[in-house]
Image: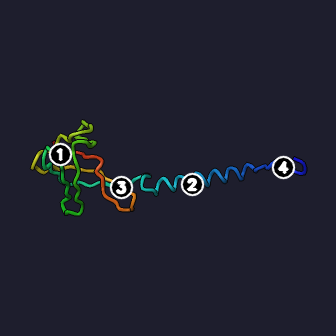
């Protein structure tokens, strides 16, 4: 095309590195603050009680009742002494309170509401 000239645009290396750092920082920020990003695990020791074996509904309470959680203990990571696994927590018995430690995290829903999800159970006495 007559009258048009092509100019080569050169981007200095420092500018390219700065752009990449901004993109990386933005990605890390978005990943750690979004509903699906990194989660901080919370832990508490207390007692758990298996309510039934039909759906493995389990409740957890701390001594001062500051933390109370309900979860299904048939599909959860567990540790008991030197054993560990995923599935039914071996120390839980229907209607009996047993000492445990749990780990949970808050999960944020698409509309901004959030709820705790128990991720693991450690049996403190077998």
Farthest residue in the left direction? 95
Label 4 or label 1, whichever comes before in sequence order? 4
In the image, what residue occupies the spot 38% across and 54% down? Answer: 40
In the image, what residue occupies the spot 72% across and 51% down? Answer: 14
Pair 3/2: label in front: 3
Asked whether 115 or 124 is in front, the reply is 115
Q: Which mark is residue 7?
A: 4
Farthest residue in the right direction? 3
Q: Residue 105: percent from the left, percent from the top? A: 34, 54
Pair 4/3: label in front: 4
Q: Which residue is identified by label 1?
A: 55
Q: Which residue is identified by label 3?
A: 107
Q: Residue 8: percent from the left, percent from the top? A: 82, 47
Q: CA distance from mark 2 to mark 1?
A: 44 Å
Asked whether 1 or 54 is in front, the reply is 1
**Badge 4: few (under 14), some or many (20 or more) residues near its Cα, within 10 Å?**
few
**Badge 3: few (under 14), some or many (20 or more) residues near its Cα, within 10 Å?**
some
Q: CA distance from mark 3 to mark 2?
A: 23 Å
97 on left or right of 27:
left
Secondary structure beneath dot 4 equals loop
Q: Which mark is residue 65?
A: none
Label 3 or label 1, whichever comes before in sequence order? 1
Secondary structure beneath dot 1 equals loop
Q: Which residue is identified by label 2?
A: 25
Image quarter in which the C terminus is found:
top left
Q: CA distance from mark 4 to mark 2?
A: 32 Å
Q: Are marks 3 and 2 in contact (CB under 8 Å)?
A: no
Label 4 or label 3, whichever comes before in sequence order? 4
């Amino acid at each position: 095309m007559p009258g048009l000239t092509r100019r080569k645009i050169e981007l200095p290396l420092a500018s390219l590195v700065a752009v990449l750092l901004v993109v990386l920082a933005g990605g890390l920020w978005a990943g750690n603050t979004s509903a699906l990003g990194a989660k901080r695990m919370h832990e508490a020791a207390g007692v758990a009680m298996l309510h039934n074996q039909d759906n493995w509904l389990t409740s957890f309470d701390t001594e001062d009742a500051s933390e109370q959680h309900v979860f299904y203990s048939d599909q959860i990571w567990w540790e008991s002494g030197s054993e560990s696994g995923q599935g039914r927590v071996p120390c839980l018995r229907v209607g009996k309170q047993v000492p445990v430690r749990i780990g949970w995290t808050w999960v944020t829903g698409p509309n901004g509401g959030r709820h705790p999800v128990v991720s693991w159970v450690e049996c403190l006495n077998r």
